[in-house]
Image (cartoon, helix red, strand yellow):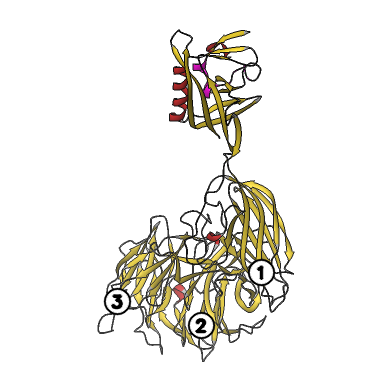
Amino acid sequence: MASFLFSSLFSTPYGEQSGGGTIDAVPHEVEVALGGHPYMIDWKAEIPLRHQSIPLLRQQQDTSEIPGEQSLNPEGLWRRVGESWHVGAGQQKFDRKDSDPHRFRSSKGFDIWSNKWKLTLLDDVDRKRTATADTNRYLAVAGSFLYTSEGQTLVRTADITPDNPTWTTITGGPAADIVSMCSNGYYTWVSYGASGIYRTNHTITTLASHVTGVAAGTIIDYVKNRIMAAAGPSVYDITSIAVGGSAALPAALFTHGNIDWKWVGFAQSQSHIFLAGYSGDKSLIYKTEIKADGTALDVPTVAGNLPDGEVVYTIYGYLGRFLAIGTSKGFRLAVVSADGGLTIGNLIETPQEVRCFEGQEEFIWFGHSTVPAFSTDDAVSSGLGRMSTSQFSNIDSLTPAYASDIFTQEYSGDVLAVVTFQNRLVFTISGGSIFAQETGNACAKGYLKTGMISYGIGDYKTALYLDIFMADNNGVYNSTVGATLTADNYISEDLGSYPTTSPLPTFLLNEQIGREYEFMITLASEGENVANGILSWLVRVQPRPPITNLIFATVLISPRQESLQDVVLDYNTDTELEFIESLNEDKPIVVWQENTNTYSVILEDFEINFHSLINDTDGTQGANTSCTLKLKRV
């Protein structure tokens, strides 16, 4: 029979080992070891040795009045569902604590507004005039005509609906490029920069001089029944110039003290006119008010400013209380107070600067230029985005719900202007001509990225199924739905696409392992008038917790313990019990050796049963014990 002191069983002195290390005596001389301490199993104990899985899910009780996702048994597959998108884009994480289940990351071609519980394709757009290299495509509506500029020419049409509308040239303008235009519904004013401001009305097809002595780059706008003009640092109120004749530019209403200042636009609220401009990387918005006698305007004062580095490009007043601000980085929505002060909301970033706005009903459309391609079958696009003035993703920061809207893939330049004409949105693209909404004709394909889905925890999961619940088109399923899976932002897999011959296409996720997932869902139309929609998506995964099970073991601890392999373990039992108590108190990760297996464990709990007192190895009395260990694998 071999006899070993406790320290003789270590391949490395215990104090020098990380996490207790391992010992060579397991399994040939002793049965198990914890943190480098050898033990024999008490095979007569009620629980000599057992491995047990940890219940992954705690018991839950649904206390809500209305049954929902929270009512389902969590012991099944974990679910996440998206069934409305009306709070808009811009949310990277779908299901974190502060996330909104009705938001998503980004989209193109999908209408999230018409029916909050159904995702449908937006209308297509059609080019309405031959493309030219002109970069000064502006728009105005007067009477029953739509006016647009191209280079030095002003043209108009009475009907934008044909594939090739009839355009009439408005004659009488100077040989200079058009730099700005506006309308009051009857008259249309056109700025030719240093060549003057001209006017026409919807009953004629000629232009006449209106204001002379104008500087290069003069912009104009019609706000609160007044014609405003600006060139360089100076602002002019030209309302008093009679429309029946021509007159010189009047004295400036206001000249900014910075000679480098450049005004970019005007807007109106219930009681104020706003002026926006910048110098270098500093942008300010001024306000002015019509004097009580209605004859003139007050001297402008500052109403708000943008952060340094963000340059204002345009402003737009809507419904008397909102001010949309287009900048070099995107757009912001501001609320106008009674005294004309501005509470400016958070920046919503866009791929390119925002240069134009158009409001209708509760929405404001904005120029959305060079939207990136969503996949290899997509292209960089330009068109419009849409924000809501009634639905906010964060009301405290004045962040409106917004999303990409109608677009074209023919040209990807800057969107310069947008108006509503014949109940259709019409917009222009620099170098790409003029485009109009094709009401009732669906765009070819829609794309939506859900945002990353983590189920609220960072553990790994196994992705199993993605279900897409479809809405029929008068009883017919005749679109094609597809999906792409991205795991942990770097593993991407095309899940394919299927004709929607049933209301529930299911995509297999090939047991992709990841901590979080994102899905790009696509819907392709078959023909111009297909209107199948998506009612919801459902993702099901199996959680993969890092803690897999518990180990229960009852070991013998006495001053002298003989193993079945004729090995004698000499313990100082007080020291050994103190060691176990320290593992329970400090919770370090240590090594558990069992047969030829090693596990990283934490001592979760222990129970010591004292059987008798016997002589210890040093001649003192020691305890003859069995100790039940509860170890948690990590």
The relative height of residue 325 versus residue 558 in the rendered view (above or below) is below
CA distance for labels 3 and 1: 53 Å
Residue 418 rendering spot, x and y as whole percentages: 52, 74
Outermost residue to the left = 292
Q: SS at mark 2?
A: strand
Q: Which residue is mark 1?
A: 470
Q: Which residue is mark 3?
A: 289
User: Taken as a whole, is the magenta stretch helix, strand or loop?
Assistant: loop
Residue 338 rendering spot, x and y as whole percentages: 29, 74
Mark 3 vs 1, N-terminal side:
3
The quarter of the displayed image where residue 525 is located: bottom right
Looking at the rendered image, the quarter that the N terminus falls into is: top right
Q: Amino acid at mark 1?
A: Met
Q: Which mark is residue 141?
A: 2
Classify mark 2: residues with Cα within 10 Å, few (<14), some (14-19) or many (20+). many
Task: Tell me if 577 is positioned left or right of 42 in this view.
Answer: left
Q: Which mark is residue 126?
A: none
The relative height of residue 318 versus residue 623 in the rendered view (above or below) is below
For the residues bearing labels 1 and 2, Cβ distance under 8 angstroms: no
Please state the extent of the stretch shown in magenta in the rendering: 11-26
Residue 493 rendering spot, x and y as whole percentages: 69, 52
Q: Nearer the viewer, residue 421 or 20?
A: 20
Q: Amino acid at mark 3?
A: Glu
Looking at the rendered image, the quarter that the C terminus falls into is: top right
CA distance for labels 1 and 2: 40 Å
The relative height of residue 339 versus residue 3 in the rendered view (above or below) is below
The reply to whether residue 388 is in sight is: yes
**Does the segment drawn in magenta span residue 19?**
yes
The relative height of residue 255 versus residue 587 in the rendered view (above or below) is below
Q: SS at mark 3?
A: loop
Classify mark 1: residues with Cα within 10 Å, few (<14), some (14-19) or many (20+). many
